[in-house]
Image (tube, rainbow, N blue to C red):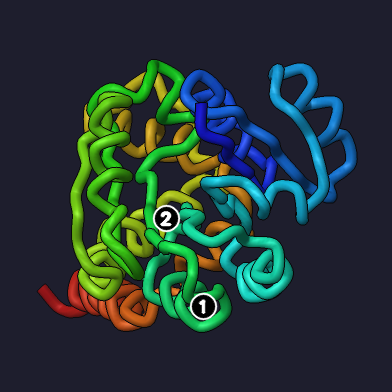
Amino acid sequence: MKTLGLIGFGQFGRLAAATLKAHFEVLVTDTGAGAASAAADLGVAFGTLAEAAAREVVVAAVPVSVMADVFAAIAPHLRPGALVVDVGSVKMLPARLMAELLPSHVDIVATHPLFGPQSAKGGLEGLRFVVCPVRGERHEKVAAFGRKLGLAVTVTTAEEHDREMAYVQALTHLIGRSLVNLDIPDEDLKTQSYQHLLELCGLIGADTFELFRAIQTQNPYAAEVVRSFVGEAQRLLDEVSGPA
């Protein structure tokens, strides 16, 4: 089995480790309290950042806000021919950081699993997975591996990913987190449309605010889409409050 270093053992990192341990010899690293014991419970090895970075495949499952520091820290430890992959929710910034900070002797693929522990509770079959080539030709192998797991894989550019995610993620998460903060009730007289809103709250409610911040601030196309939505909502309210 190929060796894989997983950097970051938060909610998604644990899902990734549980999935990947059947296909790789996985070693995880994380500075969080309890990470080592959680790794042991999951049946994967735990080690240092340098040990994780020295593996054949290195997966960065860390917040976008710390990626620059993480990539700079692992760069001296990456072996020639290694494959480095990120799983961030935006793609242009991680792709640029990896290209700039990681040595030329490694291949780089930027990816975005469009799911998390909540949406993957029933398995990975049919869930969306985006693959963006950055350096080298191994994005096709990453895509093929995703399909082997049952994922619906799309290969595209980092820029096109972020353009689409401005609607798919930034807008959806703004609406969903707003509803979560409002604590909308599960009413007896709910319609199917309202049920969809409750389901959206269930999916997004467990996400970290760090993820929400990254989706809203690290995607260069998000702000325009969100401003348009907020402006249109206010325009509609102004229209209905005016004279008939």
- Can residue 86 be seen? no
Q: Nearer the viewer, residue 173 or 3?
A: 3
Is residue 232 toward the left or the right of residue 118 in the image? left
Q: Total number of numbered labels? A: 2
Is residue 21 toward the left or the right of residue 133 in the image? right
Label 2 belongs to which residue? 173
Front disc: 1 or 2: 1
Q: Secondary structure at mark 2?
A: helix
Mark 1 or mark 2, which has the lower sequence index? 1
Q: Residue at left 28%, top 51%?
A: 130
Q: Residues within 10 Å of mark 1 (few under 14, many from 20)?
A: some
Q: Residues within 10 Å of mark 2 (few under 14, many from 20)?
A: many
Report the quarter where the C terminus lies.
bottom left
Q: Which mark is residue 232?
A: none
Residue 103 point in image, percent of width and height? 55, 75
Residue 105 point in image, percent of width and height? 49, 69
Residue 2 point in image, percent of width and height? 51, 33
Q: Residue at left 35%, top 39%?
A: 197
Q: CA distance from mark 1 to mark 2?
A: 25 Å
Q: Nearer the viewer, residue 56 or 147?
A: 56
Label 1 belongs to which residue? 97
Is residue 155 toward the left or the right of residue 47 in the image? left
- Can residue 196 be seen? yes
Q: Secondary structure at mark 1?
A: helix
Identity of the amino acid at label 1? Answer: Leu
47 vs 147: above or below: below
Looking at the image, the residue that sits furthest to the right is: 33
Identity of the amino acid at label 2? Answer: His
Occupied quadrant, residue 36: top right
Residue 137 point in image, percent of width and height? 27, 59
Q: Residue at left 65%, top 70%?
A: 75
